[in-house]
Image: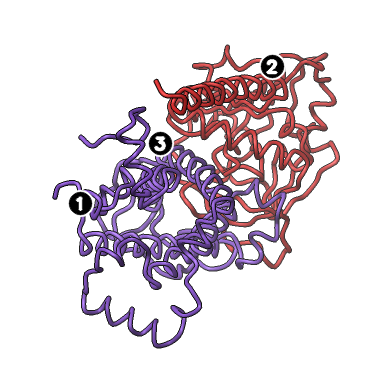
Amino acid sequence: MSESVLIPSSASAVAATSAPARHAALVRVTHWITALCFIALLVTGIEVLISHPRFYWGETGNVLTQPLFIIPIPSSRSLVPTGYGYVLPDQNGWSRALHFQAAWILVLTGLLYLISSFFTGHFRKNLLPGKADLSWRALSASIADHLRFKRPTPAEARSYNVLQRLAYLFVIFVLVPFVIWTGLAMSLSFVSAFPASVTLLGGQQSARTLHFFVSVALVLFLLVHIAMVWLAGFWGRMRAMITGRAATDTNKEAA
Amino acid sequence: MSDLSRRKLITTGLAAAAGVGGLGVAAHLAQKYGLVPPDHGGIFGLGETLTYASQRLLTRHSLAREFSRSQISKRPVPNEMAPLNDAYKRLQAGGFVDWRLTIDGMVAQPGSFSLAQLKSYPSRNQITQLACEEGWSYIAEWTGVPLSHVLDIVGVQPQARYVVYFSIEPDWWESIDMADALHPQTFLAYGLNGDELPVGNGGPLRLRLPRQLGYKSVKFITHMTVTDSLKRFGKGLGSASPEAGYAWYAGI
């Protein structure tokens, strides 16, 4: 097992200073808490969806009204006409409880990440693309690299490429805030205090439908994210996000 | 042990102590200001408590959204329901003339109210949304008497903290805190869209709590108890919902 920099020994202290961590400890810890919360939110979200796999637009929607679209899956409620001859077991109780608990932990972890990242300059240093990277030439070169599944050189792997930076910024500052907003806009109590949070979205059922689409977008991000980690070298990247040390450091040690 | 790691150990220890102390103070304050739900135990207690505490602080006096008549759903969904029990059927056969709502517990004068009595009090209307935890919803106009009006008549004692309410159907009961019980939109509802409240929607008498999900709006209400503690009711989790795995507080 690799030595953690937290273990008080002079050897690891030297290693830590000579090779700065690929990912700061705070980024690593918040990453994995977020990952766990996201899996919990996804599984429980699907369970709740199964109890009414119909989507609507506007304020109201139910089995007596016209849906916007239907997910063609069986339901955990006999009230919903699905065309399947059976009803799945009700999992809404623990699913809703875990959904909100994971949401709370994700929001608190996200706040810790946001606040500390503004202090450490994480966004500026690691996520904001440089001006030169945002030119059409640089962007199309990066897109072409991705389309050719070109693996990054060890030097390139020490920082994020421009598409990666834009994707992470989009998730952190657009998708996650929007999924929280659309989630809260379904809360009868929350919207009693902040009615504009739901009327701006077009109504409670619109909020639910948008919540579904943002979740789908987040799942697509997760799939691409895992695919990219896989292509770039799964174990090296996992090691970097768990121990903080990039694969290049260990290569040096092994040599 | 090097100086660096000792300093780290001390600061970590102090931070942990401060954290534990802070949590202790927070728990004490939360308990004092009624921000801890009765189902705060168990693995989801953290989430339930954070949700209830934050929503109670944000929404103590906020009003559920009300809609225009044109937004009323064409058909209010009567939820699926098992056949009602014999006690209900007997009262139904008599046109609900003998239906009674009894209120006891921490009140100055326990009372028993017929539907005619409840209807003789100043009636109010609200066009609000009923949303189910499953995801569907409808908007309807509810007519009834604010619960606070009836609680005023029986005289709630100052140490009361919750109102527990029971359906004529067995094992169907919920409870709410006083903020919700005295909220102006919490109704004892007996009318829907200008008519008598249909059986499928909870007639003749249903609690209407528009800032929480539908399952808190218990149908066929016959009994209420005002109390300072929920420990004596059922398994002590506040209502039948937590016993079935659902949250006591359903503001989200």
Q: Between residues B57 and B150, which one lies in front from this camera angle?
A: B57
Q: Is residue A27 above or below residue A197?
A: above
Asked whether, in this view, residue B89 is left or right of residue B160, the answer is left
Q: Any mark on residue B227, and which?
A: 2
Nearer mark to the viewer, of 3 and 1: 1
Residue annotated with mark 1: A252
Which residue ends up furthest to the left in the rendered image? Answer: A255
Q: Between residues B63 and A124, which one lies in front from this camera angle?
A: A124
Characterize the local packing of mark 3: few (<14), some (14-19) or many (20 or more) Cα atoms within 10 angstroms.
Answer: many
Indicate the amino acid at tag 1.
Lys
Nearer mark to the viewer, of 3 and 2: 3
Q: Secondary structure at mark 2?
A: strand
Indicate the amino acid at tag 2.
Thr
Percent coordinates x, y for residue A252 in the rendering: 20, 51
Which residue ends up furthest to the top in the rendered image? Answer: B232
Q: Chain of mark 2?
A: B
Q: Chain of mark 1?
A: A
Point 57% across, 61% down: residue = A60
Image quadrant for the N terminus of chain B?
top left
Same-subunit check for callouts 3 and 1: yes
**Chain given the colour red:** B
Indicate the amino acid at tag 3.
Trp
The answer to whether any part of residue B205 appears in the image is no
Mark 3 vs mark 1, CA separation in Å: 48 Å
